[in-house]
Amino acid sequence: MPQIVILPHPVLCPEGAVLEAPSGKSVCDVLLENDIDIEHACDRVCACTTCHVIVREGFNSLNEQQEQEEDMLDKAWGLEPNSRLSCQAIVADEDLVVEIPKYTINHAAEKNH
């Protein structure tokens, strides 16, 4: 089973993490199921950018981006060429290294971080 290495994030995952990631599941769902409370203000329907991640390794193994995701990513804080919305990035059969950006554009988070 592929793994997702989560790089340390000061609030969500200070020590970093290594997670088992079933193929066919979104990166966002894997994080949430492992108690890494990444924001997902639109409830994972590709209507915001709060679940934005940067895929440091394994980017090309993910499913191809759809136009809606590309349009939304243009609004993400800290956008990089290997950025994805974690709700749309589907795990394939390769390990991933993922960084959760320090900030999002969400001004009204569900929880205080």
Image (spheres, rainbow, N blue to C red):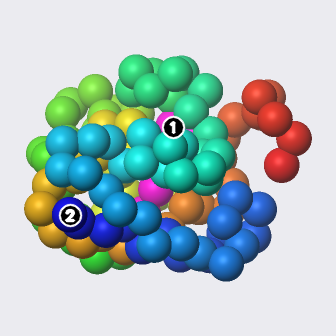
The span picked out in magenta is: 49-54
Which residue is disc 2 drawn over? 1
**How packed is label 2: few (under 14 Cα within 10 Å), some, or many (20 or more)?**
few
Q: Amino acid at mark 1?
A: Thr
Q: Which residue is pictured at 67% across the width and 78% down the height?
A: 15
The residue sitting at the right extreme is 112
Q: Position of residue 56 (x, y in %)?
A: 35, 75
Q: Which one is in front, 59 or 68?
A: 59
Q: For this view, does 14 lie left or right of residue 28?
A: right
Image height check: is 9 above or below 21?
Answer: below
Is the N terminus in the top left, top right, bottom left or bottom right quadrant?
Answer: bottom left
Badge number at residue 38: none
Any part of residue 6 in sight: yes
Q: Which residue is pictured at 44% across the width and 27% down the height?
A: 44
Q: Quadrant of residue 50?
A: top right
What is the CA distance from the residue labelled 1 to the residue labelled 2?
28 Å
Q: Quadrant of residue 18?
A: bottom left
Q: Position of residue 8 (x, y in %)?
A: 62, 76
Any part of residue 85 in sight: no
Badge number at residue 49: 1
**How packed is label 1: few (under 14 Cα within 10 Å), some, or many (20 or more)?**
many
Q: For this view, does 23 lie left or right of residue 14?
A: left
